[in-house]
Amino acid sequence: MTMPVRARGLTKRYGDLAALDSLDLELERGEIFGLIGPNGAGKTTTMRLLLDIIRPSSGDVQVLGQDPRAGSAELRRRIGYLPGELHLEGRANGRSLLSHFARISGPVAPGAIELLAKRLGVDLDKPVRKLSKGNKQKVGLIQAFMHQPELLVLDEPTGGLDPLVQQEFMALIEEASKNGQTVLLSSHVLSEIERSADRVGVLHHGKLVRLGALSDLRLDRRRHVKATLRASRSDFEERTKELRTSDLRIEDIPGQGDSLLRLTATTDDVDPVIKLLAGFEVNDLIVSEPVLEDTVLALYRDRPDDDRAAETRPEAIDREARHDA
């Protein structure tokens, strides 16, 4: 079976700056794959290379079994794309604009546009220039989904959407996955990636620094513990001398009369922490897993970068990419 996306050593350089550096990536049919990383990490560059909006400096890429550089209009009809910066202007209303896109993108089932508009809650009879940012984004999502493409490439797809519409978007990509469509999306909203993605790739200054299932990225053994308890600091510290955790802090809560302490800990084993707390009056206790954001930030902290490069990289890539596109 042909892989929807296959990249080997995919690289894009702007002078001495590598917007994307030797990317190896394979996506499976029906997979929801999330690309995460800060501005300038290479997410949009990756998507533009897959769609032949920009050309690679080196490396090989196959999209739906074809080289996108040699792909015809027929290949593009098999892809649904939502750019990160969507510009919809003009006097045409949403319905007319989507009808125009339908003639370009290929067969659209009768009623598909209207059904998507109803699900996303957008009025297609208004001129697109009068639509809010969120409603323009909805029109962009409709044009990406309406022809049921084999591959969906969605760059920051929920920007400007309210929480209820974001939930509907999640339902759409889950339905697409069950239908055998492959979804590649980038997002700064890491909770979206946690909820929807089968696998995640973490990009950092053009390099893929982590790739895998969410269960691997979440570092499941670590737990965050927060507790409020009544105890004297000296008594509590005496009992914690032999407690082994990666990080444990206590602080006094002033103005509470009897001694009231706040404990925070990060540990691979919560059992000894819970047993320690059992010897005291506990007013509040929260034990939680680290969210994906914690893992991503830790990855970045583990890879110090040249300060000047970190400051100039996003702007330099954006400036050069506009010329390239």
Image: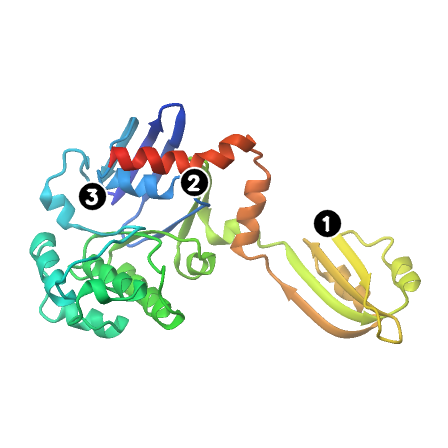
Q: Give 303 or 16, whichever is nearer the viewer.
A: 16
Q: Residues within 10 Å of mark 2 (few under 14, many from 20)?
A: many
The image quadrant that residue 51 belongs to is: top left
The image quadrant that residue 101 belongs to is: bottom left
Q: Residues within 10 Å of mark 1 (few under 14, many from 20)?
A: few
Q: Which residue is mark 3?
A: 64
Q: Nearer the viewer, mark 2 or mark 3?
A: 2
In the image, is residue 101 above or below residue 296?
Answer: below
Q: Which residue is mark 1?
A: 246
Residue type indicated by callout 1: Ser
Q: Earlier in the sequence, mark 2 or mark 1?
A: 2
- The percent position of residue 10, horizontal first and vertical second, equals 33, 31
Q: Give the SS element for disc 2.
A: loop
Which labelled disc corresponds to residue 41? 2
Q: CA distance from mark 2 to mark 3?
A: 25 Å
Q: Residues within 10 Å of mark 3 (few under 14, many from 20)?
A: some
